[in-house]
Amino acid sequence: MTDVPAELAGEPGAAQAPARRPAVTSIQSPFDEFVSRHGCSPRRGLFGLLVHDIGRRIIGGEFREGGPLPNEDELIQRFAASRTTVREVMKTLASKGLIEIKTKTGTRVRNRSHWHHTDPDVMVWNYETGPSQEFLDALVDLRRVLEPAAAARAAQRATDQEIATIARAYEAMCSTIGDPKAHSDADGAFHAAIFIASHNMILARLIDLIAIGIYGNAVLAPARVVSGQKRSLSYHEAVLTAIQVRDPIAAAAACDRLHGTWFPEAERVRRAQS
C-alpha cells in the first residue's frame, strides 16, 4: 500500500498522516491497464488510490445518494492521508459531479442525475462495481446514436491513409479471435479509427466512452467472447466496405445492423431470461 507522498510530508500546516497502514482498497482490476490509456485518473500514489477508492464506493452505493461523506478529519484518520491530499481528492470527485462540498453542511453525495456519466473514471467505476441495467441501456443507446453518424462522416471525409488504418484494425480483429484482450483492443482501434476519420475533433474525443463499453463487455463475458467475436466480424466488415466505397448512407446502416447484434453481457442475460 502507498504511503503519504513525499512532497506532502513536510507541508506547512498540513496534518501529518498517522503512523498506520492506509485503509485504501487497492483492488486488482482488469481495468488497471486500460485506464492508463484512456484519459482516466492515474492509479498510483495515495491521491490516485483515494480518488478511485472513494469513487467506487460512491458509484457502488456504499456512500448513498444525498447522504454525507465522512468529514475531513474522519477521512484523514480512515485513510492515513494528509489534509491536503484529502481536500484534493474531494475537489477531484466534485469535478466529476459525484459530491457537493459546502462549508456549513459538509460534503454530501449528489444525486446520480448530477454525476458526469461521460467521465471515463465514472464509466469505469460503474463496470468495476457491477453496472446497473440503466447504465448498460444508456451505453447501448449512446453507441447507436454516435457511431452511425461517425461512420457516415468517415465515408465522406476519410483520407486513403485513414481508411487503410480502419482496414488494418479489422484485420487485427480477424487475427485475434479467442484472445479477449487483444481482440477488444483491435475492436476499440477499429471504432477509434472511424471516429478520427470523421474529421470532427469533438466527436473523435468521444471514442473513449465507446472503448470502455467494448472492453467492459469482454471483461464481463469471457466465456461468451469467442462466439461474439466471430459473429461480429461480418458486421464490422460491412461498415469497413461502406467506408471504402465512400457511401455514407450504407456506412450508417451497417453500423445500425452491427449495434443490433451488440449487447452488454448483463443485457444478454436479461434477454435470455425473458
Image (spheres, rainbow, N blue to C red):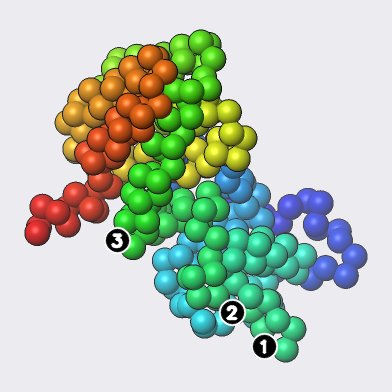
Count of labels shown? 3
Residue 176 visible to the viewer:
no
- Which callout, 3 or 2, points to the residue nearer the camera? 3
| Most foreground residue, 25 or 250 | 250
Residue 98 location, quadrant? bottom right
| Most foreground residue, 115 or 164 | 164
Distance in Å between CA atoms under marks 3 and 1: 33 Å
Mark 2 neighbour density, 10 Å: few (under 14) some (14–19) many (20 or more)? many
Q: Position of residue 5 (x, y in %)?
A: 74, 52
Q: Is 50 placed left or right of 104 in the picture? A: left
Distance in Å between CA atoms under marks 1 and 2: 8 Å
Residue shown at 50%/38% (left/top)? 207
Residue that badge 1 annotates? 105
Which quadrant would the C terminus be assigned to in this image? bottom left
Q: Position of residue 27 (x, y in %)?
A: 45, 52
Disc 3 or 2, which lies upstream in sequence?
2
Q: Amino acid at mark 2?
A: Arg
Residue that badge 2 annotates? 108
Q: Secondary structure at mark 3?
A: helix
Q: Is 268 placed left or right of 101 in the picture? A: left
| Most foreground residue, 9 or 266 | 266
Residue shown at 38%/14% (left/top)? 245
Distance in Å between CA atoms under marks 3 and 2: 25 Å
Q: Amino acid at mark 3?
A: Gln
Residue 146 location, quadrant? top left
Give the farthest residue toward the right.
12
Q: Amino acid at mark 1?
A: Thr
Residue that badge 3 annotates? 133
Q: Is 39 placed left or right of 216 in the picture? A: right
Mark 3 neighbour density, 10 Å: few (under 14) some (14–19) many (20 or more)? few
The answer to whether marks 1 and 2 mark residues whose Cβ atoms lie closer than 8 Å is yes
| Most foreground residue, 82 or 178 | 178
